[in-house]
Amino acid sequence: MGQKVKPIGLRLGINRTWDSRWYANKKDYGNLLVSDFKIRKYLKQKLPQAGIAKIVIERPAKKAVVSIHTSR
């Protein structure tokens, strides 16, 4: 019997990159992860007709850069 593997997890680092690009300390990691989730959820709810394919969040020092890849 074969094992089922998610295709995105399999391709990370080979021909696909992470959707969140940032580094955090242990105490800040959970808060930043939750805020990334909330940002993605908010954008998908507010822009359902935009055809969003990918949302990339980068966090340089005390900022957040959100890149939205759409089909339109």
Image (cartoon, grey):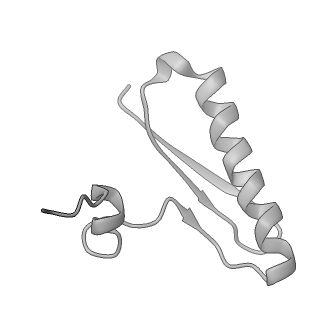
| Vertical relation: 54 (above or below) 10 | above
The location of residue 65, given as percent across then percent down, is 66, 56
| Vertical relation: 1 (above or below) 46 | below
Q: Nearer the viewer, residue 52 or 61?
A: 52
Residue lying farthest to the left in this orientation:
1
Residue lying farthest to the bottom in this orientation:
25
Residue lying farthest to the top in this orientation:
49
Q: Residue at x 26, y 74 (%)?
A: 14
Q: Is residue 62 left or right of residue 52?
A: right
| Vertical relation: 51 (above or below) 62 | above
The location of residue 21, given as percent across then percent down, is 57, 69
Quadrant containing the N terminus is bottom left
| Vertical relation: 49 (above or below) 17 | above
Residue lying farthest to the front in this orientation:
1
The location of residue 19, given as percent across then percent down, is 50, 59
Q: Is residue 69 left or right of residue 13?
A: right
Q: Residue at x 64, y 73 (%)?
A: 22
Q: Is residue 59 left or right of residue 44?
A: right
Q: Residue at x 65, y 36 (%)?
A: 41
Q: How many marks?
A: 0
The location of residue 45, given as percent across then percent down, is 64, 24
Quadrant containing the C terminus is top left
Q: Quadrant of residue 10?
A: bottom left
Q: Nearer the viewer, residue 13 or 7?
A: 7
Q: Residue at x 35, y 69 (%)?
A: 12
